[in-house]
Amino acid sequence: MDVRRADERYPGGDPATGIASRHAFSFGPHYDPDNLRFGALLACNEEHLAPGTGFDEHPHSHTEIVTWVVEGELTHRDSTGHETLVRPGDVQRLSSAGGVRHVERNDAAVPLTFVQMWLAPLDPGGDPSYEIVRGIADSTPYALPQAGAMLHVRRLTPGERTAVPDGAYLYVHVVRGGVRLAGAELAPGDAARITDAEGVDAVALGEAELLVWEMAGR
């Protein structure tokens, strides 16, 4: 198990314009050849957008993009005609496939925080697709077969114990609160990368929310 702390993330965005980003993997000008991906996961970005700010239209291709809003409301528009408001508890997926363009903004009057995760597809190319699951229930897995991956959302009460899935690659991101995972204490923004996971569990140190990626070997 490899634990990465929140303060080890690469800073990004443009704080002067109200956009602050924290990257868990090599991203943009922050290149680390030893930190390019983990399993299918290529990026896990924490994005903080002030009201009225956002990312203007930009392209993606050959990437599965999954977004989880922590607080606030994300406005999404893409070149395939989807326009959506994404709120806490929703899982949004954009399969960029052969190519798509989109806009992400905070059009609300309060700050926006979201976690965006990029995964490599098993087969590149194809047509873009989009899905949003409103208010996903705790412990309900969200399958991403395009990347050979499954997302598990766990919301824990203080002292609650939960098993995390076994798998070739397991990525655990702490959204809020704290947990003890296989003996290590993780705080908000911390993450653990586990290979050949088997029999691992997490115990909440308070109210906690986790995003857990279960990924097949490649």
Image: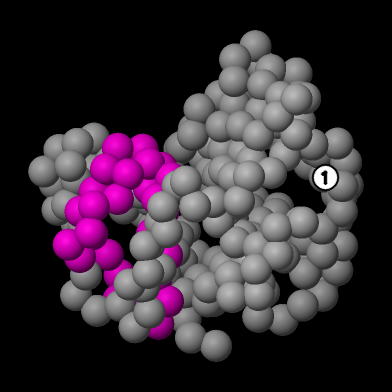
Quadrant in which residue 54 is drawn:
top right
Q: Does residue 31 appear in this view?
A: yes
| Residue depicted at x 58% and y 70% | 35
Residue type at the position of mark 1 = His
Which residue carries the number 1 mark? Answer: 102
Magenta stretch contains residue 172: yes
Q: Quadrant of the C terminus?
A: bottom right
Q: Is residue 162 left or right of residue 37?
A: left
Task: Give 23 or 149, whichever is nearer the viewer.
Answer: 23
Q: Residue furthest top?
A: 109
Q: Is residue 152 left or right of residue 7?
A: left
Q: Is residue 30 above or below residue 85?
A: below
Q: Residue furthest bottom?
A: 218
Binning the other alpha carbons within 10 Å of mark 1 as few (below 14), some (14 to 19) or many (20 upward) gives many
Residue 130: x percent and y percent?
70, 53
Q: Which residues are magenta?
A: 164-190
Quadrant in which residue 27 is drawn:
bottom right
Residue 50: x percent and y percent?
67, 21
Does dot 1 land on a helix, a strand or a loop?
A: strand
| Residue depicted at x 66% and y 56% | 65
Task: Give 112 or 121, whichever is nearer the viewer.
Answer: 112
Q: Does residue 86 appear in this view?
A: no
| Residue depicted at x 48% and y 86% | 217
Q: Is residue 210 above or below residue 1?
A: above
Q: Is residue 184 left or right of residue 41?
A: left
Q: Is residue 147 left or right of residue 142?
A: right
Magenta stretch contains residue 94: no
Residue 92: x percent and y percent?
60, 47
Task: Give 17 or 158, whichever is nearer the viewer.
Answer: 17
Quadrant in which residue 155 is drawn:
top left
| Residue depicted at x 30% and y 50% | 186
Q: Quadrant of the N terminus?
A: bottom left
